[in-house]
Image (cartoon, rainbow, N blue to C red):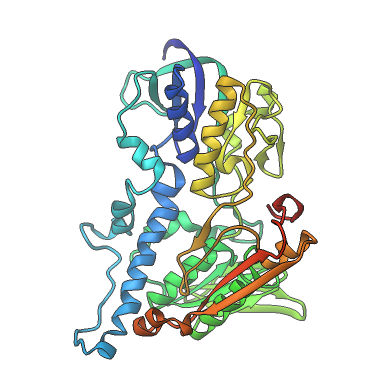
Amino acid sequence: MNAPRNDRFDLVVLGGGPAGVTAALRGAELGATVALVEQHRLGGTCTNDGCAPTRVLARAARFLRDATQLPAYGISAPPPTLDLRAPGGDAADGLPPAREEADGGTPGARGRRRPRPRRHRDIPGRERGRARRRRLLEADRFVIACGGHARRLDFPRQELAMTYSDIWQLERTPRSVAIVGAAATGAQLGSIFAAFGSHVTLLEVAPRILAGEDADVSAALAGAFTGHGIEVVAGIGGIRAIEQARRGLRLTYRLADGERELAVDAVVLAVGWPGNLEPLDLPAAGVATERGYVRVDETLRTSAPNIWAAGDITGRMMLVQSATFEGRVAAENALRGDGHSARHAIVAHGGFTDLEYASVGLTETQAAATGEPIAVGVVPYADLDRAVIDGRTEGFCKLVVARDGHPDPRRARGR
């Protein structure tokens, strides 16, 4: 191997997802020399095998659902069929449409096609070819934006279960699937598999699905899922084991009154998203971690004075929009010492389920926890002409407001 090549920059950014790309571009805009280091493809998890391709599958699911409404509008057409391998692939390709359609659909991917600022340099984590060379990068400031990965639970034969990243290898829709975890990812995957024709069982440790959302949203989704044939089991005591059965898999989980078994074709784990800490050797740099994430203060500075962190690896909020915001703040604080806070008092978020849901600001419970008087208004979609005409009358719009003044989101837990 050749001798290491040394380079010095004002800022080195580790990770080429939405947070890292934004930090690198902002650093270059501020006139700094910047190196962006990424081990795989730019765009991060969301672009390459996370939320973007999942949303493509969700759109396919909507097409299938909408097709069932055609007779009500006087339209005759043969029932659609789903081919996970089309277009353009053999069986080994799994689900190419999701990745092809999603490629370039998020801020991280758009950063790949955006003209590079003169002072911005991409450095692939793994150089191809025979003459591989080690690179030693030196900088005055660093931003860690290495993202996260799907968590696996510790129980016998957990390797038989899939995570979201394994779904793209499926060649056909499983007849039955158990999804462990019913937060945003699990709920979306459950809704998609059900639309594709699978019998879905959602297993959740919390007392309700989408436990972080407003209670009315959670209840509405649980009711809709049940109506679509999804079995919802909340309040489980954990997974005991997965076993290879004669046909498919046998999943054993705990309830308060004992154990239950499920015979399914597939098991998907959607049980959390720890940071990608393992390859970084953070203790050597004096960077403290906590609960599987890099610990940062409100300015996104780590315990090391010249290192900041942004995006999923901080464990603060696992969303593209929050990651891009944090990437910008981290770069500005690192290079200019602005000391800007990266609080997420109001971040819009939602899920591509059936029913779809979205929210911004405090839930009713969180607003009430501020101790200030609030007012709550709810409008059922069944009262709206558009919803009636579209044949989609399930759901509602809920508004939570302060009667006097504005509830302080810092006084409510979870924000």
Foreground residue, 52 or 274?
A: 52
User: Residue 303 occupies which quadrant of the picture?
Assistant: top right
User: Which residue sits furthest front?
Assistant: 404
Q: Residue drawn 41% across and 59% down?
A: 54
Q: Is residue 403 left or right of residue 166?
A: right
Name which quarter of the figure residue 123 lies in: top left
In the image, residue 72 above or below residue 368? below
Q: Residue furthest right?
A: 371
**Residue 76 placement, left or right of 236:** left
Give how far across and how far down residue 241 sits, in percent: 64, 67
Measured from the top left, where is residue 292 in percent x and y? 67, 43
Q: Position of residue 48 (x, y in %)?
A: 39, 47
Q: Residue at x 40, y 60 (%)?
A: 55
Vertical position of residue 226 compared to residue 204: above or below: below
Q: Along the horizontal axis of the image, is 387 left or right of 316?
A: left
- Give the residue drawn at x 46%, y 46%: 45
**Looking at the image, which is closer to me, 159 or 298?**
298
Residue 206 vs residue 21, the one in the foreground: 21
- Observer able to see residue 103: yes
Q: On screen, 258 above or below 330?
A: below
> Is 312 or 266 nearer to us in this picture?
312
Numbered marks: total:
0
**Residue 161 seen in this snapshot:** no
In which quadrant will I find the N terminus?
A: top left
Residue name at image x 47 percent, y 74 percent: 355
**At which x and y percent is residue 399?**
59, 68
